[in-house]
């Protein structure tokens, strides 16, 4: 018994010994051996992290198994890490599960800050830019008009429109990535769309998350992991089919889409022998396409759904946007992206939704690439760092009445540009969202078209959407129904007199 007691206490001492770099970093108390498992197992993690910040300050350390996790909860510490010291915080933590679904770590979003990743990111960025320049605005306007047509066809019957937003954002990124215009009812499109939503929800499951931290679990049966791997196979079969078809019909003088642009890069640089690209290979291209496709669907669609949910609660905001649109557009002209300069309240509403409900509330975990520091605390190389974007957006020292929907705050702020800079829904620094420009244009144009033509009402005065939502890797709006009424059917075109 004595030997067991000595061994256990030695083990506990080992677990609690601070590593040399993090001495002094505040740390909420945890359990012996399990560390802060209970803190990390919370469903409302971003809100819980904020509460911990009230007691321990904006930066603290949590321990999970043998891992240290540093959480950043306000704008100053997030900016210091991700902007000022961007390359120190540009890594991603090594992950068993991420490796399983990305040819051993060749993912764009989850891949570490290596030479091959830098090539992959630059290529994904330039391919997206190139396609955006060609046709983006017209493509999105067409999407917005198709969506209006669909909403008209509901004839005022209450509907859940989350699926419609998701289908339409998926169609846009499919068109940019593969040059294919899918029809909503095309079984192949439905299959790939389902594959994306399954992938996102399975990836956020605790049974997957736990595998990274408890290696012993990897040898046990895991039904969720089996399902995830089946979905990944479907994703890979689809991306591979697109890649092969593009290679077969590729013409260097006519770059049709993102996939073509990536193939062009491989042909030009690969001609010199792929060795010139280090570890970079076709699997990096495969994963970059998969990531743009997945990243480009649910995030933007969720933001649109959140906007409608809030606007149902705030009919006066809908009316104000509608008046602004009528003034800016004059007669019957439809909105374009250049109209955004004349639509300050619509822009402020979008900023407020991105602030209140950032759909990736904890971004994607970062990892330090070298020994570094934040606020004077040493952070050793290889530490996982979580930027709590949601926490920064709800910091009462920065945002008065932080929980309230008040788009005016962006118009009436002493320094409106500073208010914009304080919202980080797309994060910042080396890993800033690659699709920010695309997402912003989609959100603006979809909303401008929809709010110009329709008003969004609850099915009955008491059936209002829940505004708390569900936290996972994404912050999703819980399903709700809405009555979509053409403005022409309202007295004076307005909801409120
Ligand atoms: C990464 C937010 C739309 C592609 C991210 C990150 C956030 C984010 C917070 C993590 C950044 C970090 O780790 O610090 C959003 C929001 C969107 C949106 C709020 C819409 C409202 C899109 C779209 C695309 C996209 C439309 C693709 C076309 C990506 C990719 C990454 C990423 C590829 C990984 C970047 C990297 O690791 O280097 N996004 N995103 N996102 N996003 Fe988005």
Image (tube, rainbow, N blue to C red):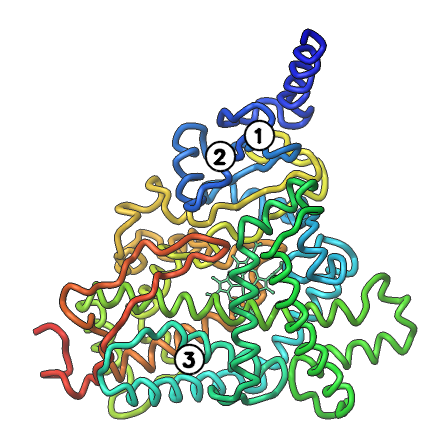
What distance separates the C-alpha of mark 1 from that of mark 2? 8 Å
Q: Which mark is residue 337?
A: 3
Residue occupied by mark 2: 38
Image height of 137 relative to 396, above or below: below
Q: Quadrant of residue 491?
A: bottom left
SS at badge 1: loop
Q: Is residue 116 left or right of residue 396?
A: right
Residue occupied by mark 1: 34
Which residue occupies the foreground of this view, 188 or 448? 188
Closer to the observer: label 3 or label 2? Answer: 2
What distance separates the C-alpha of mark 3 from that of mark 2? 46 Å
Image height of 223 relative to 253, above or below: above
Quarter of the image where the N terminus is located: top right
Q: Is residue 355 visible?
A: yes
What distance separates the C-alpha of mark 3 from that of mark 1? 51 Å
Which residue is the extreme one toward the left? 497
Residue 299: give x, y in percent of width and height: 48, 65
């Amino acid at each position: 018994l004595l030997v067991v007691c000595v061994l256990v206490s030695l083990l506990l001492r080992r677990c609690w010994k601070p590593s040399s770099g993090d001495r002094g970093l505040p740390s909420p108390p945890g359990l012996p051996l399990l560390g802060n498992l209970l803190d990390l197992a919370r469903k409302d993690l971003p809100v819980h992290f904020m509460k911990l910040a009230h007691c321990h300050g904006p930066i603290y350390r949590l321990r999970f198994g043998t891992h240290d996790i540093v959480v950043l909860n306000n704008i100053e510490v997030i900016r210091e890490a991700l902007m000022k010291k961007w390359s120190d915080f540009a890594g991603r933590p090594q992950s068993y599960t991420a490796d399983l679904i990305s040819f051993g770590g060749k993912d764009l979003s989850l891949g570490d800050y290596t030479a091959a990743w830098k090539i992959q990111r630059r290529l994904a960025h330039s391919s997206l830019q190139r396609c955006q320049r060609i046709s983006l605005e017209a493509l999105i306007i067409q999407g917005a008009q198709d969506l209006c047509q669909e909403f008209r066809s509901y004839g005022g019957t209450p509907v859940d429109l989350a699926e419609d937003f998701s289908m339409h954002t998926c169609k846009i990124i499919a068109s940019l990535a593969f040059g294919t215009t899918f029809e909503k009812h095309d079984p192949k499109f439905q299959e790939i769309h389902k594959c994306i939503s399954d992938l996102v929800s399975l990836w956020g499951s605790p049974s997957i998350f736990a595998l990274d931290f408890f290696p012993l679990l990897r040898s046990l049966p895991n039904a969720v992991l089996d399902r995830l791997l089946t979905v990944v196979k479907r994703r890979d079969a689809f991306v591979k089919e697109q890649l092969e078809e593009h290679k077969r019909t590729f013409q260097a003088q006519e770059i049709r889409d993102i996939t073509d642009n990536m193939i062009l890069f491989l042909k030009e640089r690969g001609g010199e022998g792929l060795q010139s690209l280090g570890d970079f290979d076709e699997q990096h291209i495969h994963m970059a396409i998969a990531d743009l496709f997945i990243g480009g669907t649910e995030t933007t669609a969720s933001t649109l759904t959140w906007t409608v949910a809030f606007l149902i609660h705030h009919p006066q905001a809908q009316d104000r946007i509608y008046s602004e649109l009528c003034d800016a557009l004059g007669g019957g002209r439809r909105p374009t992206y250049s109209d955004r300069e004349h639509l300050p309240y619509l822009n402020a509403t979008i900023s407020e939704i991105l602030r209140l409900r950032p759909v990736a509330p904890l971004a994607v975990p970062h990892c330090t690439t070298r020994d570094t520091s934040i606020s004077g605390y040493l952070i050793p190389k290889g530490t996982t760092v979580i930027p709590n974007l949601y926490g920064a957006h709800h910091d009462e020292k920065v945002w008065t009445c932080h929980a309230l929907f008040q788009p005016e705050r962006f118009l009436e702020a002493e320094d409106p540009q500073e208010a914009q800079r304080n919202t980080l829904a797309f994060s910042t620094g080396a890993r800033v969202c690659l699709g920010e420009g695309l997402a912003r244009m989609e959100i603006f144009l979809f909303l401008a078209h929809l709010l110009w033509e329709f008003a969004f009402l609850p099915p009955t005065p008491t059936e209002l959407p829940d505004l708390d939502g569900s936290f996972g890797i994404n912050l999703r709006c819980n399903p709700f129904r809405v009555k979509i009424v053409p403005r022409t059917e309202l007295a004076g075109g307005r909801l409120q007199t």
